[in-house]
Image (cartoon, rainbow, N blue to C red):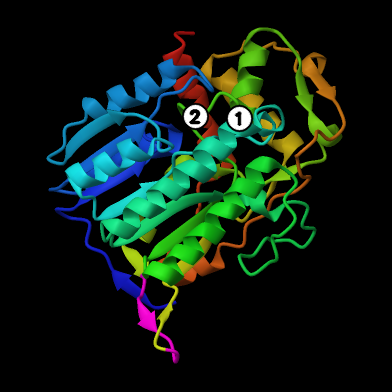
Amino acid sequence: MNKTRVELEGKTILVTGSPGFIGANLVLKLREELHQGRVISLDNMNEYYDPALKDYRLALIEKQDSPVEHIFIKGSIADAALVREVFETYRPQVVVNLAAQAGVRYSIDHPDVYIESNLIGFFNILEACRHYEVEHLVYASSSSVYGGNTKVPFSVEDKVDNPVSLYAATKKSNELLAHSYSKLYNIPSTGLRFFTVYGPAGRPDMFYYSATERLVRGESIKLFNYGNCKRDFTYVDDIVEGIYRVMQGAPAKMTGADGLPIPPYAVYNIGGGTPENLMDYIQTLQEELVDAGVLPQDYDFEAHRELVGMQPGDVPVTYADSSALEQDFGFRPSIGIREGLRAFARWYKEYYGI
């Protein structure tokens, strides 16, 4: 796909959803790599999970030694007036929208917050990008859009019209909205379908984190679909590297035969491309937790496992075809689960003072 080079040096970059998990790591990456400019973080710091983790990540950003200015604004992207004020005040040239209500299972019982953040909030971002001539909008989609697809690996060319959760439906809606705005207003936009992101200071609702907490408390962990699930686990550093590269290559603006814009629009998978069996993943996690001293050497793992059926909204396999990302940006995630879970286990021990 034809790309237009987007220079990040000296720019004002808005990252919504920072100091969320991926957002905070992206801001740290930007402030490490760039030598001038400023990064605006926008997040409502809600209590979907322990806000102390967001405070922790924000503190990491604020104590970072960087020539790139950082400004944190507490607020929701669903607040249209606030979004307009942020764009009017700071005039961001590049926008990375990571703010969203996450979680498949949470969407079953709390649909309203997904409509507010993932639909209304994203619409507000699109409207602001329209009126303030943003050079490139990069936004988070999800591997959940593939729903119950049985063809693997998942390709961005696959049909994704049958979501199995409201969360997935809102993410597919984001892609459709972005496409229409790209077509109507010639806004370069790139959607990124993330595959099961994990790592230090991650989201406590993710399996590796919640399983760790249950094991530390001496409780059992549930392995859904009787452990017969495969996930394309992607370490957060790989996700951030992918975002950073994509930010610098916006879909090129072109005019069609009808004299109207050809949508400067793209979607990519970011996943490891090596789906791991859930049983192998949890085995590796347990070994690293013992090695880090989070759990004792004689911990009885078999006594703390419970095999259960599939849960609503879940899928048995996720598997990314990231060849388009590699072709256009020369990058493919490469950090394996052993290295990634080791980093998480060591962080967990330090953060919780075990």
Q: Position of residue 33 (x, y in %)?
A: 23, 48
Which residue is most to the front? 81
In the shown orientation, is residue 120 left or right of residue 41? right
Above or below 5: residue 47: above
Above or below 354: residue 2: below
Q: Which residue is mark 1?
A: 206
Confirm or deny contact between disc 2 and disc 1 (CB under 8 A).
yes
**Magenta stretch in the rendered image:** 251-258
Q: Which mark is residue 216?
A: none
Q: Could you classify mark 2 by the number of other residues whose Cα lies within 10 Å: few (under 14), some (14-19), or many (20 or more)? A: some
Instruction: Compare residues 131 and 91 and report the one nearer the observer.
Output: 131
Give the CA separation, mark 2 to mark 1. Answer: 8 Å
The residue located at (70%, 65%) in the rendering is 159
- Res. 238 in view: no
Assign a secondary structure to mark 2: loop
Q: Position of residue 238 (x, y in %)?
A: 45, 48
Q: Position of residue 11 (x, y in %)?
A: 18, 53
> Principal SS element in the magenta part?
loop
Q: Which residue is mark 2?
A: 202
Which amino acid, mark 2?
Gly
Magenta stretch contains residue 320 = no
Assign a secondary structure to mark 1: loop
The residue located at (50%, 65%) in the rendering is 179
Instruction: Compare residues 77 and 209 and report the one nearer the observer.
Output: 77
Quadrant including the N terminus: bottom left
